[in-house]
Image (cartoon, coloured by chain):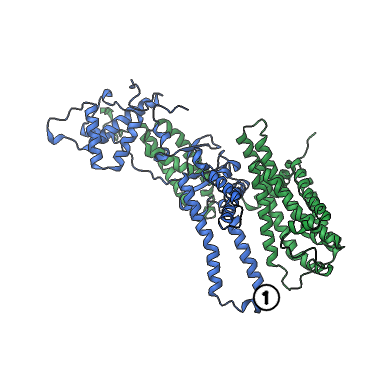
Amino acid sequence: MAKPAKRDLMSDAPYGEYGRTATLISTPEGVILPFINASFGERLGALLIDFLIMAAIPIVLLIVWVILPMEHFKEDHKAASSIMQVLGLAAWFFVRSGYFIFFEMGPKAATPGKRALKLRVVAHDGGRLTPAAVFTRNALREVELYIPLGLILGGASGTGNPMLSLMAFLWALALVLLPLFNKQHARLGDFLAGTRVIHMPKASLSYDLADLEGDARIGLTFTPEQLAYGEMELQVLEQVLRERKPAVMRAVADKIKARISWQAPKNSADMPSDETFLRAYYGALRAWLEGKMLMGKRRKDKHEAALT
Amino acid sequence: MAENPDHSNAPKPVLQLKSQKFRDARQGDWRLLNAQLDKAERDGLKSFSIDELLNLPVLYRSAMSSLSMAQSISLDRNLITYLQTLCARAYVYIYGPQTRLKEVLSSFFVRAWPRGFRALGLELILAFVLFFGGAILGWVLCAQDDTWYHFFLPGELRSVDSSVNDLKETIGGNTEDSALSPFAVFLMGHNTQVAIMAFAFGIMFGLPTFALLIYNGIPMGAMLWLFASKGLGVEFAAWLSIHGTTELFAIIIAGACGLHVGRRLIFPGDQPRRESLIGAGRLTGTVMIGVAAMLTVAGCLEGFGRQLITESWARFSIGGAMLVLWLVYFFFVGRERRHG
C-alpha cells in the first residue's frame, strides 16, 4: 500500500498520542470510536506483572507452610491436612488456568497487570465482551506459551527431545512475536476470540485557548491571506500553547511572523509577548478554519490550497 | 460583532466561536458523566439512586452525540480528545462484560451450551471414534503381546505381574477416612489440562488434537485389557464408569471443539478465513466453558462416589444415569420451537 502523502494528525495520533494506531469500533449508537491499540511493550509488561503475581502465590503459600509449626499437624489431623492439600492443589490449578479468565470476566475486563498499564479487553466488533470470548482467548495461552515453554524447559534440563524443544522454541517465538506483525497488536487468542486489547488513556478537559474578546481588545487582527495554515498546524500550535515552553513559543512565533510577513508595531511598548501573539493568531486561525468547516470546506495542512 | 446602539442597556453579546458556545452549553453534562463513571468504577452501580441510574444512559447518549457534533464543528483538539476518552470509557462501562449472574447462568445452561454442542455435529462423532479407536488399539496391541502394556503405561503400579487381589484392591473403596482425596483434585486438574490442550491444539489445524485423542484412548484400552485378562473386566469397567462417563464425555467434547476449529481454519467456506475463525472461536469457547463444568462434576463424582460406593452394580447405575442425563440434556434442552 502506498504511504499517504499527507499526514492527517487526528488519525496519526489518536488521543494526542503519537506513533500509535487505533482500532475503530462502531458502537451500537452508530458513532465510530477510536480505541488505541495496546503496544507490544505494554502487553509484554502486563504479562510479566501477571506472571510475577502468579509466581508469588505459591511462594507465599510455601512460606506460610514453612513458618507454621506443621511437623506434627499431618499425623494429628488427618482430615484437616488432606483438606489443606486439596486447597493447595486448587490454588495451583486456579493460578495456571483460572487467573486470567477470572479477572477478565470482571467489570474492568483486565488482569492486575493490565490494569496497572491501563489496558483492557474489548470485543473487536463493538458488541459486548462475552465470557466465551474471554475463555477462548485465554485457553489459547496453552498452545501459545505454556506447552512450548514446558517442552523448552524439558529440552534445557536434558530430559526432553532437543529437536522437539527447538521446534517448540521456534513455534513459541513466532507466536509471541505475532502481535508485532499486525496493526492492532493482536495475538492468536485475540484472533480466535474476536477480542482486542486496548489502552485507555485518561484525559482532562482543559480551558479553551481561543479568546476572541480579549484579542479584539488588544487589537491584534489578521487578514485571511495571513491565516495561511491548515488544521494540522492549528493543532500543533494548540499543543505549543498548552505546554507553554518559552523557547518553543519564541521559535514558533518567529516562524509564523516571517511566513505571514507580519508588521510589528512601531512603538516597542505595544509589542505583544510571544504568547499573546500566538494566542491571538490561534484564535483568528481557528475562527477562520471553523467558519469554513461549517460550510464543508476543510484544509488539512499548509500544503493544501488556501480556502477562499 | 457590531454593538447595537438601541439596546445599549442589554448585556453585550460575548464574542464567541460556535464551537465555544457548543462547549459552554454541553460541558456540564460531560463533567457529570465523568463523575458518574468515576463513582461507578469506584463503588459499583449499587451506590446509584434510581434517578441517577435512569440518567446514566441519557448522559452517555448525549456525550456520544456531542462527540459526533464536535468532530464536525470544532478544531479544539483537547476538547475532541477529552470527548473521545469520555465516550470510550462510558462505552466500555455500559457495554462491558456485566449482566446479572442469574441471567448469564440461565441463558448459558438453557440455550447457549446445548445448542453449541449440537452445532458441533460430525466432529463429535469423529472425536468419539478417535478416542475409542485409540482404546481398541491399546487393547488389541496388548492382547497380541503384553510387553506393549509397559510401553504404554511405564511405571504404572498395576502391572502385568500383579496378582488378582492386588488389582482388586486398587479399584476397591478407599480405606482412609478422607472422602475428598487430594488425588481426585489433582486428577481433575490434569483432565482439565488435557481437555484445554485438545481444544487449543485445534489452532494448529486440528492435527495434534487427532493425536491427543488417540493417545489418551490407548492407556485406557490397555488397562481394560489387563483387568479383563485377570477376570476383573466388569469390576474395572464399573470403577471407571462412575465418573468416566462424565469425564470421557467431556474430553471427547473438548476434542470435537479442537477439530471444529481446525476444520473451520482449513475449510472456511464462503467466509474469509478470519471471520470463520472468529465464528468457530465463539462457538467452541461457549462449549468449552460447559466442558469445564462437566469436569468439575466428574471430579466430585470421583472424589466422593468412587471411594464410597464400592458395589459394581451401584457404580454402573450411577455412571449410566449420568450418561443418560447428559445425553437427554444435550439433545433435548434449548431446542428452538418450530413454527408451522
**Depth order, front residue of B97/B322:** B322
Instruction: Judge left or right: residue A290 versus residue B139.
Output: left
Q: Nearer the viewer, residue B314 or A230?
A: B314
Where does the N terminus of chain B fall, quadrant-wise?
Answer: top left
Q: Is residue A173 visible?
A: yes
Image quarter of residue A87: bottom right
Drawn side of residue A300 relative to residue A68, left or right: left
Q: Whole-percent x and y of residue A190? A: 57, 43
Q: Residue at position x 78%, y 58% from top?
A: B147
Colour assignment, chain A: blue
* Residue B335 position (above or below residue B306): above
Point 33% across, 35% down: residue:
A236
The answer to whether residue A290 is above or below residue B260 is above
Q: Position of residue A28 (x, y in %)?
A: 56, 37
Residue B70 visible in this rendered orientation of the protein: no
In the rendered image, which residue does mark 1 sit on? A78
Residue A308 placement (x, y as % from top left): 33, 20
Name the image quarter holding residue B336: top right
Give the class, few, some or many, for how many residues have Cα within 10 Å of label 1's Cα (few <14, many ≥20): some
Q: Amino acid at mark 1?
A: Lys
Where is the C terminus of chain B found, in terms of image quarters? top right
> In the rendered image of this protein, does residue B39 appear above or below residue A192?
below
| Total number of numbered discs in the rendering | 1
Figure chain in green: B
Q: Quadrant of residue A95?
A: bottom right
Residue B152 percent across, percent down from the top left: 74, 56
Name, please, the residue furthest toward the top. A308
Q: Secondary structure at mark 1?
A: helix
- Label 1 chain ID: A
